[in-house]
Amino acid sequence: MDTLHQQRMTRRNFLAEAGGGFAALALAQMMARDASAETLPPFRPRARRVIQLFMTGGASPMDTFDYKPELERLHGQELGPKEKPDGFTAPAGAIMKSPFAFAQHGESGRWVSSVFPEQAKLVDEMAFLMAMTTKTNVHGPGTYMMNSGFLLPGFPCMGSWISYALGNVVDNLPTFVVLPDARGLPYNQKGCFSSGFLPVIHQGTVINAAAPQPVPDLFADPAYAFANPAQDAAGLALLDGMNRRYAAGRSGDTRLDARIDSYELAAKMQLSAPEAFDVSREPQWLQNAYGMDAEIANDFGRRCLLARRLVERGVRFVQVWSGAQGAVKNWDNHANIVEELPPMAASVDRPIATLLRDLKARGMDQDTLVIWTTEFGRTPFAQAGAGRDHNGGSFVTWLWGAGVNPGISYGQSDDWGYKTAENETYCYDLHATVLHLLGIDHERLTVRKDGIDRRLTDVHGKVIKEIIA
């Protein structure tokens, strides 16, 4: 099949022609609301929707979830590499112990730093990947890799692949929603939520949760009386006809199809969005529990609450970002981790814990998967006195909810938290596991692009069965 033909194929045509278990699975998932599938999926889906919490900048594992007593013993000793490794912003300094106290929590005895007192109470419900690693020490490529499985731009992110494979749950809200930090977009900007070579309709819909109107221009300005519902409908009908005639002769370009779909979705969202995006409809005690009563947690808490409202109403994949690109006000703690990490941790700790409790109280833990991750870790060596440099060698990810084996950990870093030591895990393995929990075989979710059968996990990846219940 040549590339042009592949680009011209719709998702449904692709599924009809592809054959095999994945085609039957994906088509069944897309049409589940309308008809029953004759062919069962190769394995039972455990999750129906996903919330991904992404800590921009590289959250330090040895100061959060990966306790390293050896750093205390070796504190101050010059044991790091003599030459600056690629991606480090400065030569390695002396070994630096964590400035934060660690304690064991829950029946699992999970060690957690004092910066996460609320998440520490829920460790028996989480599954930890303690030996995550990546191929880079640089933010941009690392963020791409954790989202799309590739170091370079141009590839679909996980949310887009999931949207493409399973389609929407409801017709009046986007399938894939992105809630960036109010301070700005992450590294790579909107490239992190790109649909790459998949149809544009599967890219993330970016919502500014802090704005008075999270979805801009959804309604006409009251100053223009002629823009009433009747005229709006007539204008959209005319525009729809023009667009479809234009698109008929350009079937290889998915951008116009996506724009038509976005107009149709916008019309439906005029009814659904005002209610869905209005977190003030939640009880005040619950808003406070999410941290909206505290300046430090208000933004992230609002977005966590909004994420719950959206998945509850049928959005399939929601990303909540903590931190924007840049040298400050994110998890990129180069200068002074004692001063920089605690406020970032405080901004997310209570909101995340409340999100998990809220989902569980509503019974949504049975079909909602929550993922906490970052693009890489930090060095066990000091930088600039009390900071930590980039380190792709080892970092931590946790999963919670549908299909997750709670209270366990998989993998282990070395005694310094510098490199992986046991059961090394890449983004490919994480992505394969997430797709598995959604009922998708990661090796069969493919699209032929430029002569290559591309997939989210590239040519790698294994399902981490140890963390699946």
Image: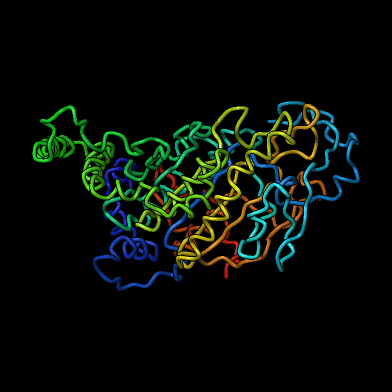
How many marks on residues? Answer: 0
Residues 84 and 354: in front is 354
Q: Is residue 70 above or below residue 466?
A: above
Q: Nearer the viewer, residue 447 or 80?
A: 80
In this view of the protein, which residue sits in the foreground, 269 or 137?
269
Residue in front for this viewpoint, 284 or 72:
284
Coordinates of residue 93 in the picture (x, y in percent): 83, 31
Q: How is the image coloured?
A: rainbow
Q: Residue furthest front?
A: 284
Q: Quadrant of residue 143?
A: top right
- Location of residue 408 with respect to 88 vertically, above or below: below
As drawn, 222 above or below 202: above
Q: Quadrant of the C terminus?
A: bottom right
- Taking 313 as reference, is 287 left or right? right
Q: Is residue 415 visible?
A: yes
The x and y percentages for residue 197 are: 38, 40
**In the visual, does 221 lie left or right of 54?**
left
Measuring 42% from the left and 50% from the top, which residue is drawn there?
Answer: 161
Q: Residue at x 9, y 36 (%)?
A: 231
Residue 319: horizontal and vertical position, in percent? 47, 46
Q: Position of residue 297 (x, y in %)?
A: 55, 42
* Residue 245 visible from this viewpoint: no
